[in-house]
Image (cartoon, grey):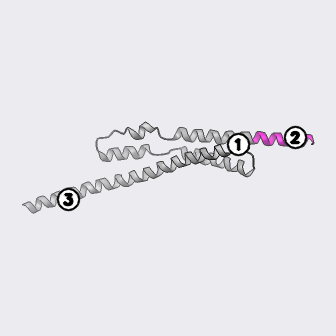
Amino acid sequence: MSQSTLDDDDLFGEAANEMRSDVEEHLAAARDELPDPDAIWDVEADNTLGVLNALRSELEPGEAEAHLRDAKKWYTMGERADAFDDAGDLEDDIEAVEGLITDLTDAREQVSDLAGTVPEIRSELESAGDEESDSDE
């Protein structure tokens, strides 16, 4: 084997390690950006709509999505280059973070829908009460 080949193999190994580190760093950053569990559990507000709005704000994944995207980008590059000896743990971590972000997004949409529906229901109930009062007169 020539010296050039050894250097190329060494460089490839170094690049593979850097790619793995990049993926791990972006996954860690994505996890750090996820909402605090207590923040979505302990919501304070004066009424139902306030609780829903506070909860909707807390369910925002923030920059976690961007970090996940970067982790997936470097993971894909490493996989296509066959740079990882064992990438199963990275794939599992990516899927776990992606699942959390999907769950947050879905929950946020449901809370948004509910936050839009609750005032409508209240208004309809008030109107129904007014109509009942008018018919009693």
Q: Is residue 12 magenta?
A: yes
Label 3 sits on a secondary structure element that is helix
Q: Which residue is mark 3?
A: 127
Q: Is residue 15 visible?
A: yes
Alpha-carbon span between mark 3 and mark 2: 81 Å
Q: Secondary structure at mark 1?
A: helix
Q: Residue at x 91, y 40 (%)?
A: 3
The residue at which mark 2 appears reads as: 6
Tell me which segment is drawn in magenta: 1-15
Whichever of labels 3 and 1 marks the residue nearer the N terminus, that label is 1
Residue annotated with mark 1: 19
Q: Quadrant where the N terminus lies?
A: top right
Question: What x and y, as percent, mark residue 92?
Answer: 61, 46
Residue 83: image x %, image y %?
A: 75, 46
Q: Main secondary structure of the magenta part?
A: helix
Other-residue count near label 3 (Cα within 10 Å), few / some / many at <14 / 14–19 / ≥20: few
Q: Residue type at mark 3? A: Ser
